Amino acid sequence: MKIYAYGIIDSNSGMDEPLRGLGEASVYNIPYRDIGIIVGAYGHTPLLSDEAKEKTDTYILEHERIVERLTEGFTVLPMRFLTVFNTKEDLLSMAELYYEDFKNNLARLHNKVEFGMKVIWPADTIKQRVVDVYHKTKHNVSISTESPAKTFVKEKFQEHIIEKEFQEEANRCVIAVDDHFNKIACEKKLKKLQTENLLLNASYLVDKDRQNDFKQAFEQLKNTPGDLKFLFSGPWPCYNFVTLTKKPSSVDYFNTEDMLGRLLAQQGFAQERNSV
């Protein structure tokens, strides 16, 4: 029977209460030095086909449920969905390899939670404003009488300038949004313009006792007049803030972005969750 791993915790003691995870398998702690790896038995076939999507989504929720329960009593480093080891020896070899990283992350993430935020803006409208300003203030000269070569070069230059201004406007908006949380968040991860309309995809690491401060800052931001729309999620376990100094092997055990994205899609990104 293979071993399914849910996460690393800051304890090598046994579980205080029985938990059942994927496939109703018992969840237990495998100790390594002064930390532990929370695991369960895993005898399922890979959930990769389209037909398995519904079952996969159920398992993702089960994985998240276990991680959530663990955060009630421990500091947790959540592992990637479907992280499976063939043997206990393989699992302990992984723990030995990353032990120092695990210790550093457990100390850094102690008593912290994660919030997510997406900022949507009307990219076409913003870009048209940039174009209008450009033509009004910088380029009123007709190019119709110029040679095709000069016209082509000038049009390409205009496209470059307009795109540059668009990016700079995005930067200004991201800074303005982020300023609301700078004094509250311990750490942050900001991804700008993953698509033209997705201005910002942000994750913030926040002390548990400052959750209300963060939520109030978001409410103030949400009520600010303007073209931006906001989607808010959290608090979550610290999915996006586990960092490894050792280069991951062929398997990145802590790349949880895809799993968290699917959780958000299932539960509704804009829904505020109960505090951890």
Image (cartoon, rainbow, N blue to C red):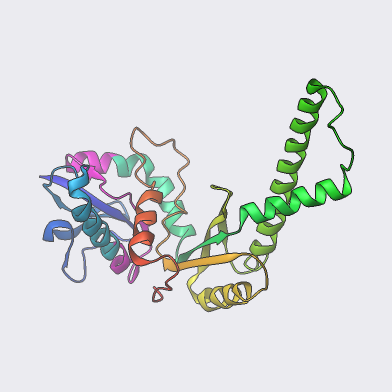
- The residue shown at (41%, 56%) is 239
The reply, left or right, for residue 150 in relation to residue 41 is: right
Q: Residue furthest front?
A: 145
Which of 144 and 88 lies nearest the eye of the viewer? 144
The answer to whether residue 170 is visible is: no
Q: In this view, does 247 lie above or below 268?
A: above
- The residue shown at (34%, 32%) is 250
The answer to whether residue 261 is visible is: yes
The image quadrant of residue 179 is bottom right
Which of 87 and 166 lies nearest the eye of the viewer? 166
- The residue shown at (25%, 43%) is 92
- Please provide percent x and percent y for residue 11: 31, 61
> The C terminus lies in which quarter of the figure?
bottom left
- Please provide percent x and percent y for residue 154: 80, 30
The image quadrant of residue 126 is bottom right
**Residue 77 counted in the magenta span:** yes
Q: Give the range drawn in magenta.
A: 67-93
- Please provide percent x and percent y for residue 227: 64, 65
> The N terminus lies in which quarter of the figure?
top left
Q: Is residue 182 above or below residue 96?
A: below
**Residue 123 counted in the magenta span:** no
Q: Is residue 224 above or below residue 177?
A: below
The reply, left or right, for residue 229 in relation to residue 15 is: right
The image quadrant of residue 13 is bottom left
